[in-house]
Image (spheres, rainbow, N blue to C red):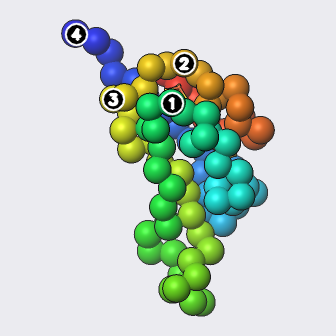
Amino acid sequence: MARRTRITIDYSICGDGNEVDPRACGACMRACGPAVFTLHQTFGAEEKDPCDPQQWRITPLWASLCTRCNKCVKICPKEAITVE
Ligand code: SF4
Ligand code: SF4
């Protein structure tokens, strides 16, 4: 049986209102051919204006589509992604 791919994003670096706003970068999303990642608002974030959410993160929602090409790992300017 094929082993499952685990993709991890360090949210202490990218997303959740931390160092990188994934809406401003998004390099991993553009690099990923099979479109494994999705960009979404952080659930439960306290927002001054819910119509203008400030806290976002990228989640590898469709990890089963990952070809382990490592493009996302190489392109991430903050080394925030690991694929195992
Ligand atoms: S390793 Fe390749 S296929 Fe997998 S998430 Fe990263 S860019 Fe996408
Ligand atoms: S490439 Fe890295 S820093 Fe840029 S959005 Fe993706 S995880 Fe965040």
Picture coordinates of residue 51 (x, y %)? 52, 85
The first of marks 4 and 3 along the sequence is 4
Crowding at mark 4 (Cα within 10 Å: few <14, some 14-19, many 20+): few
How far is the residue under mark 1 from the one under mark 2? 9 Å
Marks 1 and 3, Cα distance to the nearest angstrom? 13 Å
Q: Amino acid at mark 2?
A: Cys
**Label 3 neighbour load within 10 Å: few <14, some 14-19, many 20+:** few
Residue 80 percent coordinates (x, y)? 66, 39
Q: Please name the residue that numbered disc 3 is placed on.
A: 64
**Mark 1, residue position:** 33
Residue under numbered circle 2: 69
Q: Earlier in the sequence, mark 1 or mark 4?
A: 4
Q: CA distance from mark 2 to mark 3?
A: 13 Å
Q: Is residue 71 in view from this perspective? A: yes
Residues at circles 4 and 3 in contact by the CB criterion of under 8 Å: no
Looking at the image, is 44 positioned above or below residue 35? below
**Mark closest to the chain's N terminus, 2 or 3:** 3
Mark 2 within 8 Å of ligand 1, using the beta carbon: yes
* Numbered tag placed on residue 1 in the rendering: 4
In contact (CB < 8 Å): disc 2 and disc 4:
no
Label 1 beta carbon less than 8 Å to ligand 1: yes
Q: Secondary structure at mark 4?
A: loop
